Amino acid sequence: MDWERLADFLAQHRLLLRAGEWIYESRRKLATAVMSVLVMMLAYHVVFAANGMVAYQRKRAEHRKLQQDIGRVQLENDRISQRVRELKSDPRAIEREAREQLKYARPGEVVYISPEPKSQRPAASAQKR
């Protein structure tokens, strides 16, 4: 390496030499600033990224809701299964269902059917004149 050419280059470019000295003298401050930026980016990623804390909390809430839904559906399933078993084997349950659904009655009994409220009736069609 030609030291004279390097000395001439540095003499002509004093600004470059001063910039190099400034970088060397403030290397700790620059390293601290770079590390601070990296830590902030990492913290942002941990909190707001696709699998960050915000998404994690949202997924936990959804999991709790789904567990509640599963429990409710299982109870409903158990209730319906019990009713099916009763309808298959219990004559009283069969009779009760026939009385309610089919409006059956025993001999000598009278079944009263109340009219439906107006809000549950189908819409009236146009009347003939």
Image (cartoon, rainbow, N blue to C red):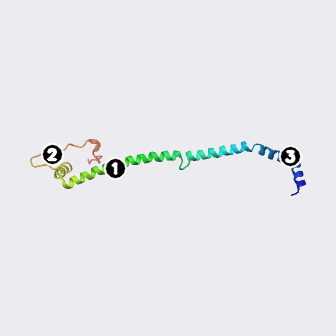
Write the residue at 62% across / 46% down: 41
Q: Which residue is mark 1?
A: 73
- Mark 3–mark 2 Cα distance, whole angstroms, equals 111 Å
Around disc 1, counting alpha carbons within 10 Å, would you say few (fewer than 14), some (14 to 19), or many (20 or more)? few
17 sits to left or right of 97: right
- Marks 3/2 in contact by CB < 8 Å: the verdict is no
Question: Along the polypeptide, which appears first: circle 1 or circle 3?
Answer: 3
Write the residue at 35% across / 48% down: 71
Query: Which disc, if any, is residue 14?
Result: 3
Q: Nearer the viewer, residue 117 or 84?
A: 84
Amino acid type at image mark 2: Val
Amino acid type at image mark 1: Val
Question: Along the polypeptide, which appears first: circle 1 or circle 2?
Answer: 1
20 sits to left or right of 124: right
SS state under label 3: helix
Write the residue at 56% across / 48% down: 49
SS state under label 1: helix
Q: How many marks?
A: 3
Q: Nearer the viewer, mark 1 or mark 3?
A: 3
Q: Which residue is mark 2?
A: 111
Amino acid type at image mark 3: Arg
